[in-house]
Amino acid sequence: SVVSGQLSYWTERLAGLPGLLEFPTDRPRPLVASNRGARVTVTLPAQTGMALRALASEHRATAFMVVHAAWAAVMGRVSNAVDVAISTPVGGRGSAVLDPLVGMFVNTLVLRASVDGGQSFAELLDQVSASDVEAFAHGDVPFEAVVDAVKPVRSEAFAPLAQVALNFD
């Protein structure tokens, strides 16, 4: 079935993903997450938005992909990691059968990037763009099913598969 094929994609794509993206902190990680995270909202000036769209167009990417690549580079640098997983919410019903139903249909995708300090941003963007296209094409599998299939490190102290999220409007 379509879903089982997509689930196979996710188990292969996320195999070997590090259990935790470690960041330098001023205190130890609690044994149980408080879920009192923060939200950082950034509004880009119009000129920056135009430059971002131009860069995306130059690389046959989207503005989301440019921001994702930049965020992955920052997360890799801060955490001193080369394998960075970032989650993102995705909307959509995925099937015409669901169109008449009332309600919000949201899923979470885990976007994985290989961040190498020796690569250019253009190289990272090209890699992230290809990876994002694949991930979105396999986005019908519920996040919970992906977690069950991948069997990541589980802890009450952090979220499975990705501890950093990117929501781009």
Image: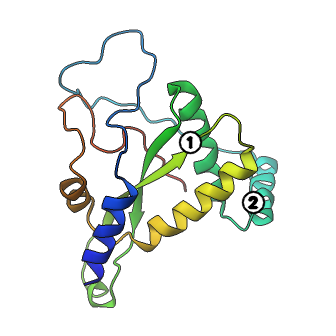
Residue 82 vertical position relative to residue 91 in the rendered view, above or below:
above
Residue 61 in the figure: left or right of residue 160: right
* Residue type beneath disc 2: Arg
Does residue 99 appear in the picture of this structure? yes
Q: Residue 159: x, y in percent?
A: 27, 39
Whole-Å distance between the Cαs marked 2 and 1?
A: 18 Å
Q: Which of marks 2 and 1 is in front?
A: 1
**Residue at the spot 31% in from the left edge and 37% down from the top edge:** 19
| Mark 1 burial class by Cα count in 10 Å: few <14, some 14-19, many 20+ | many
Residue 21 vertical position relative to residue 54 in the rendered view, above or below:
above
Q: Name the residue under label 1.
A: 72
Quarter of the image where one finds residue 92: bottom left
Q: How many numbered marks are there? A: 2
* Tag 2 secondary structure: helix
* 49 or 162, nearer to the observer: 162
Does residue 104 appear in the picture of this structure? no
**Residue at the spot 54% in from the left edge and 68% down from the top edge:** 133
Q: Residue 20: x, y in percent?
A: 34, 33
* Tag 1 secondary structure: helix
Q: Residue 98: x, y in percent?
A: 27, 84
* Residue type beneath disc 1: Ala
Tags 2 and 1 touching, CB below 8 Å: no
Residue 110 vertical position relative to residue 36 in the rendered view, above or below:
below
Q: Residue 139: x, y in percent?
A: 38, 69
Task: Give the quadrant of the C terminus.
Answer: bottom right
**Residue at the spot 65% in from the left edge and 64% down from the top edge:** 62
Indicate which disc, 2 or 1, sits on the residue closer to the N terminus. 2
Task: Give the quadrant of the N terminus.
Answer: bottom left
Q: Which colour scheme is used?
A: rainbow
Q: Tell me, for residue 53, which label it has, or none.
A: 2
* 8 or 24, nearer to the observer: 8
